[in-house]
Amino acid sequence: MNEPSKQRWGCLQWGVVVSVGLLGWLFLSSQGSSIAKQGAQMRGVNNCKQIILSLKQFSKDNSSAYPDAGSAAVGAESANQIFRRLFEEDILTAPNESIFGCPNSVFAPDMSIGTAPDFAQALTPGECHWMLLKFQTDSSAGDTPIVVENALNASWPPKWNVADPSDNKRGRVWKGNKIIVGRNDGSVAVEKLRPDGTIDWRRMYNAGYGTKSWIDTLTPEQVAKLAYWDVEEK
């Protein structure tokens, strides 16, 4: 009796299977990488929102001013020192030091804040990722960029490192040359930089609304004084 012939898989068929599997793996890998990047950005956005909420809470008991106003801020030289006041005023406690970091950043809080009243271990050098625009209040224009990711410079205008977008460097950017910007109205977004590493501060709020952007409400003298509280590096 003749036995039915058995189908044999040739090299071409196996090659098709391997190719399809490889393409599927590459697709899932790219999707996973994209999801991971979005998740990291969302954690950064949430941290920035929490910082702004803390600043708002501080302002309620300080005549609308943020922590860099008044005699308590005299002698301060960095964002680290200004943000530390949020611990001194008991607005933030130990676990919340984490909000001053950002995924994949070289600036990483160690969750140790020290003890009252000065909390000297809170936000020591290398533990604060975010810069704060100087001498603003809760009543500043809503689209004022209060909190931004650390830039290459704290003077105006700030500039980020689009030439080398790798992580773990000062002034780093997200893929696509973007940074996280937190504004005085509490909104936080991942915004696109110009090719030179600066940001068009008028673009986000001026187009199509018929109103002035925050920077257009300032005098030339006020613009000349704009600067951020810089981060402390190790």
Image (cartoon, rainbow, N blue to C red):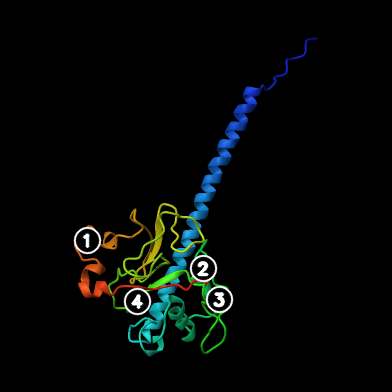
Identity of the amino acid at label 4?
Answer: Lys
Query: Counting residues from the N terminus, which is met first, the one under dot 1 or under dot 3?
Result: 3
Identity of the amino acid at label 3?
Answer: Pro
Give the percent coordinates (x, y) of residue 45: 44, 64
| Of the pair 133 and 14, the residue shown nearer to us | 133
Give the percent coordinates (x, y) of residue 33: 53, 50
Identity of the amino acid at label 2?
Answer: Phe
Residue at image coords 20%, 65%: 211
Neighbor class of circle 4 (other Cα within 10 Å; few <14, some 14-19, many 20+) is many
Query: Counting residues from the N terminus, which is met first, the one under dot 1 or under dot 4?
Result: 4
Disc 4 on helix, strand or loop?
Answer: loop
Quarter of image, res 66:
bottom left
| Of the pair 226 and 30, the residue shown nearer to us | 226
Q: Which residue is mark 3?
A: 95
Q: Which mark is residue 229?
A: none
Q: Which residue is mark 1?
A: 209
Query: Counting residues from the N terminus, which is met first, the one under dot 4 or under dot 2?
Result: 2
Neighbor class of circle 1 (other Cα within 10 Å; few <14, some 14-19, many 20+) is few
Give the percent coordinates (x, y) of residue 127: 52, 72
Figure quadrant of the N terminus: top right
Disc 3 on helix, strand or loop?
Answer: helix
